[in-house]
Image (cartoon, helix red, strand yellow):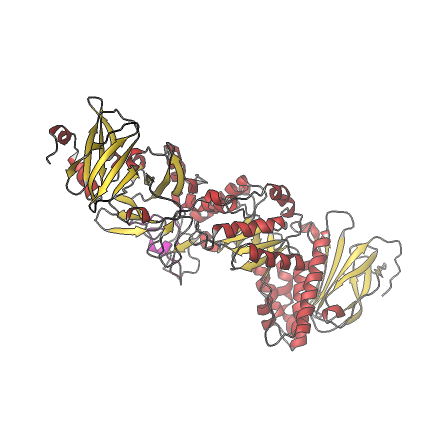
Amino acid sequence: MAMTKKLYNLMDWAEIEAVTYAEEDHPKSVLGAHPVRGGQTLVTAFRPNAAEISVKVKGSRSLTKMELADEDGYFAALVKNREPFEYELEVTDKDGNVTMEKDPYSFPDSITKRDIQKFNSGIHYRVYDVLGAHLISLGGIEGVRFAVWAPNAMRVSVVGDFNDWDGRLHQMERLFDSGIFELFIPQAKEGDNYKFEIKLYSGHTFLKSDPFAFAKEDKENGASVIFDLDSLSGSDASWLEKRGSIQSDDAPVSIYDLGCQPLNKKSARDVIKHVNEYGYSHVLVDAPFDPLYIATSKPSDVTGFNEAMHKASIPVIVRWNPSSFSSEESGLTAFDGTCIFESGDGKRSYVPDSDRKYYDLGRGEVRNYLLANAIYMLDVYHFDGILIADTARMLYLDYGKTEGNWTPNMYGGNENSDGIDFLRQLSITLHKYSSDILLISDDDTTFPGITSSTQDEGLGFDYKINRGWLRDVTGYMKQEPLGRSNHYNEICFPLIYQYNERFILPLSDLREVFEYMPGDRDEKFGNLKALMSYFIVHPGKKLIGKQSDLSDNAAGSKELQSVKTLQEDVMALYNKSSALYSKDLESDGFVWINNISARENILVFAREGSKKDDIMLVVANFANVPHKGYKIGVPKAGRYSEVFNSDNDKYDGFGFVNSNPVFSAADECDGRKDSIRIRVAPLSVTVFKYAASKDAASKS
């Protein structure tokens, strides 16, 4: 049947053609309800598979049949009511099936100009509540609002289970000529699979996963899945009241690195038991997200794990890598046909020896994507801190790259000014969000001011992992005990720069450490116990690798139990001895006594707490030679009681210990007026606790 002349004259045929060819980025100007002269409303719809469509106005008993304006499936009708009004479409498909549908193009935009401006500027810190797929209600109608950033696309459509993956049906509205596309679809529901279909000006069309999706299909290049974040219940109010004291500068911090493992309530029980057994304060987990906003297991499992840890008063830190992303075809690479998440300069975007791309941190929207993800992990999943892996990749443009394969900054240098600015903005943003979260950098560079205040041009991190400590100390420990004298400076060197940053000391998996220790099995275990003890009494917070069996072949149960007992005891000593942690970050909390005994491979130093006379004296002997009546200077005259000795027979040692308190004598040594004489076991660390005493008689 021919279209009425009046209706024909109301058609914008150029825009209709853009819709039918699926090339329209402002479909709401053509589809939906639009008032026309004479107090009427033009209602249009594009349904390529429909045989008939009628308009059902709310409150009206009758239906208005729509006319086929274009044979590709563009329908139109004049309704007497003046818009706005609620209506549905009665759609009869070509098989005769009839459905009543809410028209997605009858709903107003719900993302504001302010949202877009903040996102473009990189300061919309909860933009994950705006972009992506969200179950919302518009005008009392339940549905899903889809939004995506694709500034250089000709057209973007939502395709999924709710529209037979047909990109013609739900072409999205470009908002305010910005790069954000939006559409509210009443037919979509939680659990539906979806992707964005992007069409370029060249005519090329392809599918992309949602960068802000919260769930996805469990398969390669799987579709994004609509998920309701509000379903993640739970309250941490009581936990947040005490978190600050656990994560303060003067608290004992020992972080147990779980690595990559499933996070759920069941695994939490085992972790809590282990953490409590050894006395660790925190746990570190690999980010359970891939990509950044998608939980690799059930989201409720991740929140369940964290809630269980918090009930046990254990903060959870997440390891996060915001430097690069996977270059898989359905992901962020050339997302809208151009490089919007990565740099257009291939020398800057490629990651050496990897199928990944570096983020373009000079772009406000990309910074916002990452900043919001950090807030997302804290706000939605209730993590207590973030450890940034590979920070160096964000600090230096040439990191890991060969000459000629990187692009210098505008001054010709290798510093990544965009990355530095991003990290500074990240620390300011996160600490403004919550003053008691921990932000930790893991990098092996000497970039200055990682933990300095942003007001002093630093990056504002709370801590930095001291990879240099691990390299220097383990390098020393790899040497044969008799040859360590020539490497004595390596064990002393970390304490020269210890207070340049706020450091966390790392210690690798003990099985790996055990393998490189020199000597026979007894010497390996002696070295291992000395290293573990030295690690705990050394200034700096602690990061401990996942503890597994030391060696399936070399380690017997007796030796393994001795190391386990030592670990428990030295951690208990650390947790109850404020001198070992309360001034960890202050140089006056550490005092050298002897760092010149290279021939004997002995170090002596004191750790001092905030309170008067809160002193622990540490003696480390890294040679396999014992000493009886060994003379050392002491910081104060008084009584020194041995509170820990790694050679104790309970740790399968020789028992060469100082059973009785030792009193200082006015006998100069190590530049000190007073000294004590003690027994020093081979390959050992001994710790004495100081107490003031009038009795200066030495009892060795």
**Residue 182 appears in the picture as rendered:** yes
- Which stretch is magenta? 337-362
Image quarter hosting the N terminus:
top left
Residue 46 vs 344, above or below: the answer is above
Question: What residue is drawn where x is 33% and y is 32%?
Answer: 108
Camera-nearest residue between 142 and 12: 142
SS assignment for the magenta stretch, majority: loop
Image quarter hosting the C terminus:
bottom right
Q: Residue furthest top?
A: 38
Question: What residue is drawn where x is 59% and y is 77%?
Answer: 553
Residue 377 vs 523, above or below: the answer is above
Q: Is residue 316 left or right of residue 19?
A: right
Tell me which corner region of the image, top left, top right, bottom left or bottom right, holds residue 351. Answer: bottom left
Residue 275 coordinates in the image, percent (x, y): 63, 57
Camera-nearest residue between 259 and 692: 259
* Magenta stretch: includes residue 269: no
Q: Residue furthest bottom?
A: 520
Residue 527 coordinates in the image, percent (x, y): 66, 70
Residue 374 coordinates in the image, percent (x, y): 48, 46
Camera-nearest residue between 539 and 634: 539
* Magenta stretch: includes residue 345: yes
Residue 11 coordinates in the image, percent (x, y): 16, 32
**Residue 465 appears in the picture as rendered:** no
Q: Is residue 274 left or right of residue 640?
A: left
Residue 661 vs 454, above or below: the answer is below
Number of numbered discs visible in the structure rendering: 0
Tell me which corner region of the image, top left, top right, bottom left or bottom right, holds residue 659. Answer: bottom right
